[in-house]
Amino acid sequence: MFEEMTYEKILRDVLDNAPDGIDTRQGSIFYDAVAGPCLKIAKLYTDIGIARKMASIATATGDDLDDKADEYGVTRHAATPAKYRFSFEGTTPDTGTRFYNDGRYFLLRYNTLEGEYYLEAEVPGEAGNVVYAGTAAIPVNEIEGLKNAKFGEIYENGADREKDESLRTRVQEKIAGPAENGNKQHYKTWCESIDGIGHARIYPLWNGPNTVKAVLIDSSGRACSSSKIAEVQNYIDPATNGYTATVDGCTYTVGDGLGEGVANLGAHFTAVSAHEIKIDIAFEADLASGFTPQEVQEQAKEAIDAYLKDTVLTTAAAEDVVIRAARIGAIIIGLDCVLDYKKLTLNGGTENIKPGADFIPVAGEVTVTT
């Protein structure tokens, strides 16, 4: 709005409106007298423009966006730590014992829901999602009687602090919804208010009247852990009476519908994790000079990972996720290490892949031949 109000324009306007006969050349008394105030006025216009942007959900960033979101009862998701299953032989380590791997430190925790130990990254964020199952977990301090300890599979991905665009989208969805009175948007807002939940697909009447199902995806675009599903279930509609429903051969836990969570009395809510479907990619590549198939494979997998994550987390709940062969091809040809490609296949075929309502695509094997 005030972009045109630059120092040069303001100064020129003042000089042009000087009284007749006044010397307005640079270095004159009049010029020197007005130049300073004109600079201050230009800075004031700049500050007003910045303040205007920070006061709008559409343009605010950082702490200013947090303040605007807070006005609508929406809070930025904090970073969450990666969690790994844990196996060991010998003496049982105490909870809170520190282990490390490749410069990263993890704390031993106990999952009362599943009755097992797990390792939790000391520093939250996606950087903790890099340890392979079977990797040795080295105790920081020697533990007498502990023969060996290993990382198992990751079961809850770490997530970075929520980015501005994600927070902005959640606030705008709440405003536009509106999310109130237990409507569909309200359930989505409730689910996505939990740290670590990146996207929720809501299905009303999925098993008859007064039933609602949420298919949940974590902030990394992956399946949610059982503990995170339980957290959402307990927040919205605790399931303590042992109600279940079998639909299409799958048995689901069903909330009590007693209004003991945020859901309305009589509404039976079911939280489930999206199921992962691996997308294996194969293609022949004409390599750029100096690159190897292994380097192409690594770069392609990283780029495809990012594409799948973005697709999963940004596709509207009412739309089907579609993995497009043409988009994968565009990613491949956009790599610096690839001059051209052919014979691209997705899970052995050449067609687009639609995983389905309860499923999410994740990158599988990337095979590069020359």
Image (cartoon, rainbow, N blue to C red):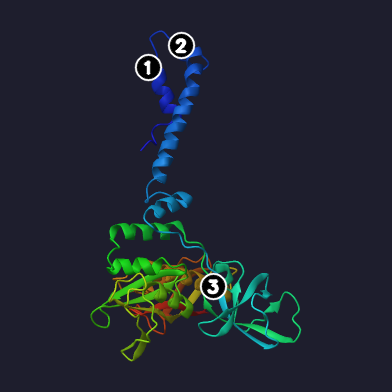
The residues tagged by marks 2 and 3 sit, at their Cα atoms, a distance apart of 68 Å
Question: Closer to the camera, 178 or 324?
Answer: 178
Q: Residue furthest top?
A: 21
Q: CA distance from mark 1 to mark 2?
A: 12 Å
Label ID, residue 17: 1
Q: Which residue is mark 3?
A: 296
Tell me: 247 left or right of 306: left
- Residue 366 x, y percent position in the rendering: 50, 79
Asked whether the viewer can see residue 223, the reply is no
Disc number placed over residue 51 in the picture, else none:
none
The residue labelled by disc 2 is 23
Q: CA distance from mark 3 to mark 1?
A: 65 Å
Q: Amino acid at mark 3?
A: Val
Tag 1 secondary structure: loop
Can you give x and y, in whole percent of width and height, for residue 71 in the image? 38, 52
Q: Where is residue 90, by image quadrant?
A: bottom right
Q: Earlier in the sequence, mark 3 or mark 1?
A: 1
The answer to which image quadrant residue 260 occupies is bottom left
Q: Hey, what amino acid is under mark 2?
A: Asp
